[in-house]
Image: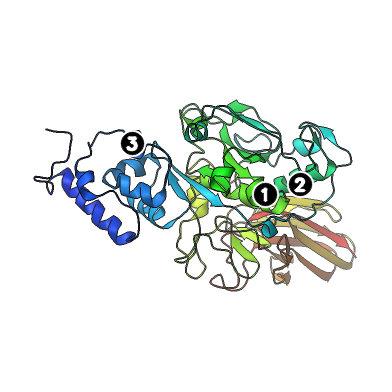
Amino acid sequence: MSSKLRRTGALVGAGALVFAAVAVAAGNQADAQQTPLDQLLDQPLDQPLGQVLGQPTPGRVALGKVQYRLADVAHRNGLTEEKLRDTLASDKTSWLDAQGRLFFREPGLTSAQKAPEASPRWASESVDAATGPAFELHSKPGSNRVLYLDFDGHTITGTAWNSSQGVDPVNVTAYDTDGNPASFSTAEQDVVHEVWARVAEDYAPFDVDVTTQDPGQDAINRTDAADQRYGTRVVIDPTSWYQSGCGCGGVAYIGVYDTTGNHDYYQPALVFTKGVGTGAKNLAEAASHEAGHNVGLNHDGTASVGYYEGHGSWAPIMGVGYYRGISQWSKGEYSGANNTEDDYGVIGTHGLALRADEVGDSTGAAAALAVGATATGVIAAESDVDVYKVGIGAAGNYTATASAAALGGDLDIKLDLLDSSGAVIASADPPSGQSDAGTPTGLGATLSSNLQPGTYYLRVDNTGYGNPLNDGYSSYGSRGAYSLTINLT
């Protein structure tokens, strides 16, 4: 039998699939650029996708070219045909490369939107190259999974990015704001530290080490299914080799975090300072977003916008988090959401499991907390609560404080004080908000009570705020790190 789809009898067998695909695609994207039907019917079924696409192709155009091979392309990307079709048809930032792998080009920001804000001060002196504490940060050292935030330059070679641009190697220079890329000033180190803190908080619920220290390529690459030590590199790129052609803020392939065999070919994810600016808030939002694509996530938008900018003080990480104090993983609970995928569930299928619960969730399994000491923990699952047992030796007024992450907090805390029988005697859950786009408010909780000697319990719970449809968020994405203290006041 001929490998081509003949016009004669085209409604039989494979030809019926072509007509079905054409009809569905036409219904989903009337204004998309599609390959004419007579050309589709003459394309060999076994023609390599590299010949069908030829080069990286925008989503709608790509859909017109590959609709008769949609099942194959969807399989390559670990997506259903429906999900791939919808993404290519509706997401203007979606692209297929010559091999049919899906990636995204994020839009860049205006000059005003790229304006940086001052970062907290940590560094005390300039350092040469990538040395010093800012380049030794780890959120979960020892994890078999890694998310490497690469600020000190990187040579990109032998990857899909090289192939698409026709240049190999690409030498990305170090992050730089003062014109001296060979040295990191105190201000530059402060940005590195803040970006790390914010991204680490976004990924705190997962068993992954977010780090600024080069873990070595073996810790990122995945050679085969037996290789359980792998991750992704997010390069903070100040150069123009790719960005000048797209005007974009970042690029990343989807679902490649746990890919085997050709893992390095679809690395790294890239965040362009020329597209999003040099400030920590923007860089962190973009880095978490691009890494989110690597672990399988699509964009969060609405029927009218590709990226949802959020409401109140909240936005989804896979939408646009630049302008809101609280950005969280989402399952599309806001009004008009076009993507209701379970972010935590999808991430879990691409190599990142939730971290193990380290603190008991009942009075019987409570962890000990001494007056004046500080406990730290992470709420990783939506249903998780952490309970601490406190022995009060002297009567007096005691104040307990549960604080969310100092930078980019995702966890909104409800704090309960329980007596020895487990009955709640005091609770605190202030309303959340923001003082500016980089600073959430009301995520922590403080309560005071006059206590007699005895045994008490403090319970840290995650909570939402307002209505997730239009002015708040549910407890779904309210997960992250906290610290807890109780003191005699």
- The answer to whether 199 is drawn above or below residue 300 in the figure is above
Discs 3/2, front: 3
Q: Is residue 386 visible in this depiction of the protein?
A: yes
Q: Residue at x 37, y 47 (%)?
A: 62
Amino acid at the residue labelled 1 = Leu
Foreground residue among 349 and 153: 153
Local packing at callout 2 (Cα closer than 10 Å; few below 14, some 14-19, many 20+) is many
The residue tagged 3 is: 49
Looking at the image, residue 236 lies above or below residue 402: above
Q: Position of residue 156 (x, y in %)?
A: 58, 30
Marks 2,1: beta carbons within 8 A: yes
User: Can you give x and y, in whole percent of width and height, for residue 317 in the image?
Assistant: 58, 56
Amino acid carrying label 2: it is Val
Question: Residue at left 46%, top 60%?
Answer: 340
| Residue denoted by label 1 | 283
Q: CA distance from mark 3 to mark 2?
A: 42 Å
- Residues marked 3 and 2 touching at CB (< 8 Å): no
Q: Earlier in the sequence, mark 3 or mark 2?
A: 3
First of labels 3, 1 by sequence position: 3
Dot in front, 3 or 1: 3
Residue beneath label 2, please?
A: 191
Q: CA distance from mark 2 to mark 1?
A: 9 Å
